[in-house]
Amino acid sequence: MALTLPAWAPGAPLERLQLEWLAPAAIEVAVLRLDRIDPLISGNKWYKLAPHLRAAAAAGAEGLISLGGAHSNHLHALAAAGRRFGFPTVGLLRGLQWDTPTVRDLLAFGMQLHWLGYGGYRDRHREGFWAPWRERYPTLHPLPEGGGGLPGALGCAALVGQVREQLGALGWTDYHGWWLAAGTGTTLAGLVLGEAGAHPVYGAMAVPADHGVGPQVQAILGEAGRTDQGYVLVDACRGGFAKVDAQLAEFIRTTEAASAVMLEPLYTGKALMALRQRVEAGYFAPGTRLVFVHTGGLQGRRAGLLGQAAAQPVSLSPSSDGAIEPETWSLESPCVKP
């Protein structure tokens, strides 16, 4: 039976963020709480997934097949959506079979898993990669890693409208820019498209520069026919993706205590910490109003990196979507300089 497009259009609340380092600089921040749209299909993942679901339904597909790692927020949201809305899902996972809280959820949600090894996963960019999987699952629609590409970005463009509709409740008539974590750059590209030059979008890169955020954003915008920039990329990786140090862990702890907004250390924690550094350095003029996007991913806290970082800095080598290799503890490549 062909996939039926779910009639679900969640909205995220926009809330003031009250933190002690904002007031001295006369900076106001509101947080778009994508983490609150749903307990399972959380964060920016649904907005990236929805256009691909529409494409799958239009093609007469019965379900979706995608890629990710053992802690993948993308696969977690996809599997949860399949369970809730009644369509089959298949996950192609990086590395060797590994038991993690995320993997246990994927299985509980009914996702069929295939472990590709590390070399096999690297082949995902090779021409012809999808051919055997299409043959094995002819009724499933292939979904890019992380729900990326122009369709995913266009899904995120709708967030601009959600924010503008809620400004009045904050007493705002306008804002001066966006701030969010960037892993693949898909959500950032979507906001740039949605803003169409009206406001800048600041992307705090949670990955080193050689992970290709800049080229991926440029490719999406180029495909959409957008030639001007409209965004700024800022280093926030703190030595490497999935590297969590004691300073970051303490920042997350104190921020959660002060605001009751839960963060995770790979994306939202690093992004908000980078914003604090820019605010305290005087990067933004007094009176600036910013929208911080909480991109979700709280299920990833179960990896335990915050607790480990309290004792010593932790550096785990991940895939591009957030999977963490259990046997690799080497430093990532250097970050781009601010």
Image (cartoon, rainbow, N blue to C red):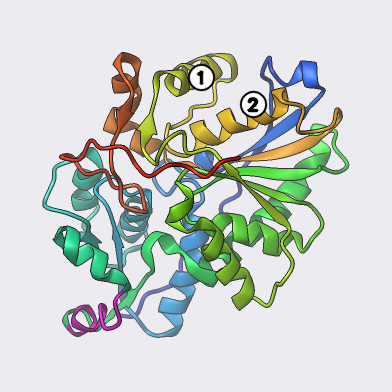
**Labels 1 and 2: the sequence-earlier one:** 1
Residue at the spot x=85%, y=27% of the render?
Answer: 286
- Crowding around mark 2 (Cα neighbors within 10 Å: few <14, some 14 to 19, many 20+) is some
In this rendering, position of residue 94 left or right of residue 263: left
Magenta range: 126-135
Residue at the spot x=26%, y=79% of the render?
Answer: 130
Q: Amino acid at mark 1?
A: Phe
Percent coordinates x, y for residue 21 in the rendering: 69, 18
Q: Nearer the viewer, residue 240 or 191?
A: 240
The alpha-carbon separation of the residues under discs 1 and 2 comes to 10 Å
Q: Is residue 61 above or below residue 102?
A: below
Percent coordinates x, y for residue 28 in the rendering: 77, 29
In the image, residue 99 lies in the stretch drawn in magenta:
no
Q: Is residue 123 above or below residue 113?
A: below
Let me know if residue 227 appears in the view. yes
Q: Element type at marker 1?
A: helix
- Name the quarter where the N terminus is drawn: bottom left
Report the residue marked by disc 1: 251
Q: Is residue 252 above or below residue 292?
A: above
Residue at the spot x=42%, y=35% of the render?
Answer: 239
Report the residue marked by disc 2: 276
Percent coordinates x, y for residue 271 in the rendering: 55, 36
